[in-house]
Amino acid sequence: MLYQMHELGRAWMAPMTYWADANAKIFGASGTWLGKLPGAGQLAAGYELMYRIGKDYEKPRFGIHSVDIDGAAYPVIEREMLHKPFCRLLRFKRYADDAGNITELKGQPPVLIVAPLSGHHSTLLRDTVRTMLRDHKVYITDWTDARMVPATEGDFTLDDYVAYIQEFIRTIGAENLHVISVCQPTVPVLAAVSLMASRGETTPRSMVMMGGPIDTRESPTQVNDLATHKPLSWFRDYLIHEVPANYAGRGRKVYPGFLQHSGFMAMNPERHAQSHWDFYQDLLNGDLDDAQSHRRFYDEYNAVLDMPASYYLDTIKVVFQEHLLPRGLWDVAGERVDPAAIKGTALLTIEGELDDISGQDQTHAAHALCTGIATPDRHHLTVEGAGHYGIFSGRRWRGQVYPQVRDFIARYAG
């Protein structure tokens, strides 16, 4: 019922947001008589702020059309390599123009970036992808909004997530592959590679794990506390809802994106309120670059997806409540996850000093589990002054983290 009420509210608000958008354009157009009226600038700024607060945010595009390598721009084409009901495997192919001959750049190590399925779309890692493209062949998991997956496609669990990762690794080819997992997928990626190793399969050359909840008993954060102080039944009763009839996934049980977004905003309400006030002031003062930066950030931040209910509840139970991975008690599809079985794969863990989502040592805990990896092949980086997003996006990612990730991958590239 809550989801249906939310959709009713959206439908009721839609005319007002369209009206606010139209007025923002009318009063913001300097070439019209309305744009020259006293106070037109204030009206335009207020209407745009109203529009952006009330509008729906669709999934953004990656929009990576070229990459700069050694001062030269190389075209990039986004291609779908594999389509699964709940995820697409994307490849960003780079091309060079050699005297009129368009050829694909080759000879650089392939990298699979496993994006989180935890609210935001995989485009949140746009900066990660764009930076990695300088020196690598880049693939990424592009998770599908569960409300758009027909119920006839069946359920999606944490075990299914692990199986997806294994299939993607095999599709690309594990023998030369390097896998980067950001936040939530550190757990299923470690499980996927562990199970492959236990079966005697070829495993990736390296794993880079960034800000993930390998062992949430270490330095618990506000996110961890919520998961441990409520029983699983609370999450099932209050956070799981049925997709309404106006979506392809009607009838599917999900953790709705709008509830996740409310949680994101509630973690730092003062910061978001100040950001919106600053945006209004930037519009009044003509600071168009700062205003555009605000638009870009919130176009991404406010775009959320629904998570499959079974997957979400599995994650709460396995990762945050029972800590089955670090305790050595996790079975995936009847097979025990044993990270100690991994032997031919190097490991790099990365944490942000100020990460308020995955606390200190939660990712580093992977080293205590991966005892089969030789000590010289296990590395750790703590990024001073970085929060959760700073280790994979922004200035610190590009200037401090990426050079070390690049050099680590190059050390173990075939």
Image (tube, helix red, strand yellow):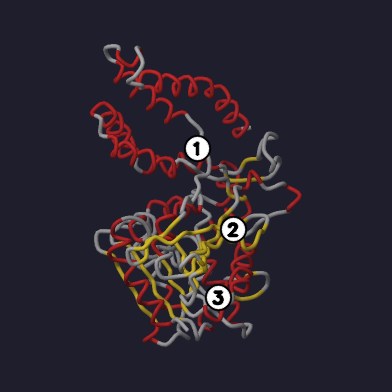
How far apart marks 1 and 3 lie (CA) works out to: 35 Å
**Three-letter code for the amino acid on which mark 3 is drawn:** Val
Question: From the viewer's perspective, is the residue at label 1 or at label 2 nearer?
Answer: 1
Residue 179 in view in this figure: no
Extreme residue in the front direction: 99
Asked which secondary structure carries label 2, the reply is helix
Where is residue 295 drawn, in percent x and y?
38, 38
Number of the label disc, if any, that sits on residue 27? none
Residue on which the image places disc 2: 314
Q: Please report whichever mark, 1 or 2, sits nearer to the chain's N-terminal start.
A: 1
Badge 3: few (under 14), some or many (20 or more) residues near its Cα, within 10 Å?
A: many
Number of the label disc, if any, that sits on residue 193? 3
Residue that appears at 32% across and 20% down: 30
Badge 1: few (under 14), some or many (20 or more) residues near its Cα, within 10 Å?
A: some
Please state which of residues 103 and 225 is positioned toward the viewer in this rendering: 103
Q: Please report whichever mark, 3 or 2, sits nearer to the chain's N-terminal start.
A: 3
**Three-letter code for the amino acid on which mark 1 is drawn:** Tyr
The answer to whether marks 1 and 2 mark residues whose Cβ atoms lie closer than 8 Å is: no
Question: From the viewer's perspective, is the residue at label 1 or at label 3 nearer?
Answer: 1
Residue that appears at 50% across and 57% down: 116
Say if 206 sits above or below 292 in the image: below
Please state which of residues 270 and 225 is positioned toward the viewer in this rendering: 270
Asked which secondary structure carries label 1, the reply is loop
Badge 2: few (under 14), some or many (20 or more) residues near its Cα, within 10 Å?
A: some
Residue that appears at 57% across and 60% down: 90
Residue on which the image places disc 1: 57
Where is residue 247 drawn, in percent x and y?
67, 38
Please state which of residues 333 and 394 is positioned toward the viewer in this rendering: 394
**Three-letter code for the amino acid on which mark 2 is drawn:** Asp
Asked which secondary structure carries label 3, the reply is helix
How far apart marks 3 and 2 lie (CA) works out to: 19 Å
Left or right: 272 as drawn, with respect to 171: left
